[in-house]
């Protein structure tokens, strides 16, 4: 029985056993890649395993939680972001200039210079190609810290061929007076032009390296699964290749991205591609690497004044902003995907878009389909209730509610929306499944600061500040931990085999050094990550 391991003297988080917030189980047994017993050291099963020579690991009273599942991430983009020059320490333009120029000299082998972490105030918000053209002759792409825009040099703008194209819906290509691009690509000009461009020109080796880095970062952070929220064939192929190259202990479920077009034939083609991928990588035959559904992006973000609200953005423009997907198209695409047995995920942030998304899912009339809405920042009281009634998963990214990131909200939102922003508690009160994700790389991928945001509504980015974003929307630590594990598993029909420390489930768990209170989550650390019964990260071995 050498492949049996007893994990004793732990505080195992097993809420499905009806334990209260501060109650834990003390012991569990893993055989091969599964949990075979969950209970206490004194249980008969544990004694029997001991007698038969099982290995015993003393977890020294540390907390063990199920492996985290990032319910909304962009895994390849996250890995590619890790490879970029980090400018987040640069305080002024001269710092940026110096950092890029040094990096460019050190890396003559690179065909372009990719940077991240540019803090816009460090250049007083100025981002012209002409400011950086002299640094290097190669294309330079500088991604903003908030990931809502990229600052490009002239060579990069030329490489993307943006001189002749109009602004995409929900995005802006900043221009000089004569109409030519001036350097800044904002919102969907970034997500719809810059990111796909960089993805397409990256080599297969670069993508593989990016995924290996992303995998290591996720295992180190305590993840044993993820839901990738805008899959395309390039990223899927890279993931497939990674699994050929090495053992990937993370389980992956993907939502295939369907871009908006008002041409029904084109839309049909996109959906047919998603349907084909879904049947090829079906959750019933390939649960740990599957395509579960589609993803559509129905509006933008509040900061960029591109989320569709019931009122105009204060001080920005007199009119209201429309959703990217008109209601009729959304209904059509949701019903087609739902009828084909696919799960639907809809990015919806503004109150108008959220209502349209719920109406569209209602129209598809498949409450067992576990359709989901991503972000849900500004749901009305009624719409917050409808999620649970219609079986819709509330897919939330608490890291986006960090007070540092919502500073502009009260200036542009009317009080009736701002006062109840990110109403997570209402989603739970309405009995919706809540699943927590990070939306990496648009925000940090770490699970524990994300739980801190969800439960305290205070800032993980500026822990000294006492500011909180709509504290009434907070959920409890136990609710948040469930949403980040079994809630996320349920959201992709995986609750039968992962997401909790349960007999028969994949032995996925994380050992945390923590006081297990909301207020102390920022000091909590991941000590070990175990996936499929194997230790895949150990803090003690980390350098
Ligand atoms: Zn996303």
Image: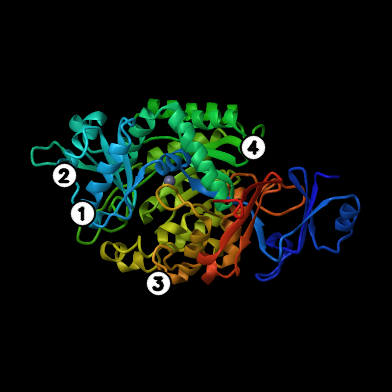
What residue does disc 2 label? 131
Disc 3 residue crowd, few under 14, some 14–19, many 20+, Cα 10 Å: few
Q: Are marks 2 and 1 in contact (CB under 8 Å)?
A: yes
What residue does disc 1 label? 123
First of labels 2, 3 by sequence position: 2
Measuring from the top left, give residue 2's x and y in whole percent: 83, 45
State whether residue 12 is above or below residue 268.
Answer: below
Q: Are marks 4 and 2 in contact (CB under 8 Å)?
A: no
What residue does disc 3 label? 464
First of labels 3, 4 by sequence position: 4
Q: Are marks 2 and 3 in contact (CB under 8 Å)?
A: no
Q: Looking at the image, is mark 3 or mark 4 nearer the viewer? A: 3
Tell me the distance, in whole angstroms, between the alpha carbons under discs 2 and 1.
10 Å
Residue 287 disc label: 4
| In the displayed structure image, the side of residue 530 where residue 422 appears, left or right | left
Tell me the distance, in whole angstroms, between the alpha carbons under discs 2 and 3.
35 Å
First of labels 3, 1 by sequence position: 1
Disc 4 residue crowd, few under 14, some 14–19, many 20+, Cα 10 Å: some
Q: Are marks 1 and 4 in contact (CB under 8 Å)?
A: no
């Amino acid at each position: 029985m050498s492949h049996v391991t007893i994990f004793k003297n732990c505080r195992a988080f097993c809420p499905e056993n009806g334990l209260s917030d501060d109650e834990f189980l003390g012991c569990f047994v893993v055989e091969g890649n599964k949990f075979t017993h969950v209970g206490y050291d004194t249980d008969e099963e544990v004694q029997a395993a001991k007698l038969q020579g099982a290995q015993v690991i003393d977890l020294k009273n540390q907390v063990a939680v199920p492996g985290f599942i990032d319910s909304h991430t962009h895994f390849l983009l996250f890995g590619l972001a890790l490879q970029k020059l980090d400018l987040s320490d640069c305080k002024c333009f001269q710092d940026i200039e110096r950092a890029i120029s040094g990096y460019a000299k050190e890396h003559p082998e690179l065909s372009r210079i990719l940077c991240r972490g540019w803090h816009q105030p460090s250049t007083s918000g100025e981002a012209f190609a002409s400011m950086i053209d002299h640094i290097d002759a190669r294309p330079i792409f500088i991604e903003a810290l908030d990931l809502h825009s990229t600052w490009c040099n002239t060579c990069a703008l030329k490489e993307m061929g943006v001189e002749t194209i109009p602004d995409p819906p929900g995005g802006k290509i900043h221009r000089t007076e004569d109409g030519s691009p001036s350097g800044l690509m904002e919102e969907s000009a970034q997500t719809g032009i810059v990111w796909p461009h960089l993805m397409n020109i990256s080599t297969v080796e670069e993508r593989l390296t990016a995924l290996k880095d992303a995998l290591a970062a996720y295992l180190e952070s305590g993840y044993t699964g993820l839901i990738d929220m805008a899959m395309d064939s390039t990223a899927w192929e890279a993931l497939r290749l990674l699994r050929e190259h090495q053992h990937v202990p993370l389980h992956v479920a993907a939502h295939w991205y369907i871009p908006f077009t008002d041409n029904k034939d084109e839309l049909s083609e996109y959906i047919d591609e998603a349907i084909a991928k879904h049947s090829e990588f079906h959750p019933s035959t390939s649960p740990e690497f599957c395509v579960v559904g589609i993803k559509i992006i129905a509006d933008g973000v509040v900061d960029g004044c591109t989320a569709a609200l019931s009122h105009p953005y204060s001080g920005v423009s007199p009119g209201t902003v429309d959703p990217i997907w008109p209601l009729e198209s959304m209904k059509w695409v949701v019903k087609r995907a739902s009828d084909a047995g696919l799960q639907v995920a809809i990015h919806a942030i503004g109150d108008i878009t959220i209502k349209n998304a719920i109406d569209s899912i209602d129209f598809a009339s498949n409450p067992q389909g576990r359709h989901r809405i991503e972000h849900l920042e500004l749901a009305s009281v009624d719409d917050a209730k409808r999620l649970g009634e219609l079986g819709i998963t509330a897919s939330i990214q608490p890291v986006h509610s960090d007070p540092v990131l919502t500073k502009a909200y009260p200036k542009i939102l009317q009080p009736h929306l701002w006062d109840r922003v990110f109403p997570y508690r209402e989603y739970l009160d309405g009995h919706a499944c809540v699943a927590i994700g990070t939306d990496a790389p648009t925000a940090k991928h770490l699970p524990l600061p994300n739980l801190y945001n969800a439960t305290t509504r205070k800032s993980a980015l500026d822990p000294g500040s006492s500011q909180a974003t709509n504290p009434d929307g907070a959920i409890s630590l136990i609710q948040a931990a469930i949403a980040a594990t079994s809630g996320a598993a349920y959201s992709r029909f995986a609750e039968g085999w992962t997401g909790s420390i349960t007999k028969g489930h994949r032995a996925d768990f994380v050992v945390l050094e923590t006081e297990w209170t909301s207020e102390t989550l920022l000091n909590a650390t991941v000590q070990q990550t175990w996936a499929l019964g194997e230790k895949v990260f150990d803090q003690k071995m980390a350098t």
